[in-house]
Amino acid sequence: MAEPESPLAGVPAIVGPRLVLVEMPWRAKVTVRGRDGDPALVAGVTAALGTAPPLEPNRMSRAGTRTVLWLGPGEWRVVGPPHDEAAIIDALQRTVPRSMAAITDVSDCYTILRLAGAGARDLLAEGCPLDLHPRAFSVSHCAQSLLAKTDILLHQIDATPTFDLQVRWSHAAYLWEWLKDAAATSQADAVTAAKTRR
């Protein structure tokens, strides 16, 4: 099946001295939504993916090329490589009873923006209410929140720091422009501060 074209198709990456912003290539995204963290549900997801889903709030686990992000008790989003959504759904449907959870392909509902660099954390903090200090939010943490009044699923990839932001396609262009403007303002402020210190 052909991948639908992203609303940000053709938009060049933003590269600055302290951060890089780029839209990631298409990824499979499947949401498992159960009523709670029932042990039978956890066992079914584990059997399907080959690893236990995260049970601690705002954490992730890995299953080969797939990442499993915690959304809530008994709720996860599985992110995999391109065209993996059918395989993820098939595996989950074989081991998770329909009465326990809804399994939904959301691949074409969300795109992933990747923000990396020394200035990434400060930039996110300008529009996100989460405590993003490394003591509170670090590698392998994830959380649903708001950025510039837009719903996001935020996931820290590494200590660079690098963050993946899942955002609805309908909000992607707006959030991109907000990030671009905020990055430009942040860069201008940094230059002004450097001149002031001289």
Image (tube, rainbow, N blue to C red):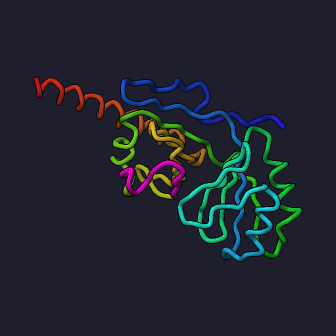
Residue 146, above or below 194: below
If the image is split into quadrants, where does the C terminus sit?
Answer: top left
Spot occupied by residue 122 in the image (x, y as percentages of width and height):
34, 42
Foreground pick, 32 / 139: 139
Depth check: give the residue in front, 39 or 32.
Answer: 39
Dominant SS type (magenta):
loop
* Residue 1 versus residue 88 in the image, above or below: above
Across and down, in percent, residue 137 comes to 43, 54
Q: Which residue shows up at 64% across the image and 54% down it?
A: 61
Please report the residue visible at 66 percent of the width from the left and 70 percent of the height from the top: 74
* Quadrant of the drawing holding the N terminus: top right
Q: What's the magenta region?
A: 133-143
Q: Position of residue 103 (x, y in %)?
A: 77, 62
Q: Give coordinates of residue 152: x percent, y percent.
A: 52, 52
In the image, what residue occupies the spot 69% across and 41% down? 27
Q: Residue furthest right?
A: 94
Residue 8: image quadrant is: top right
* In the image, residue 116 above or below residue 78: above
- Whether residue 13 is situated above or below residue 126 in the rendered picture: above
Residue 197 placement: quadrant: top left
What residue is drawn where x is 53% and y is 54%? 142
Indicate left or right for 90 with 6 as reference: right
Residue 141 falls within the magenta-colored stretch: yes
All told, the count of numbered labels is 0
Residue 176 is a magenta residue: no
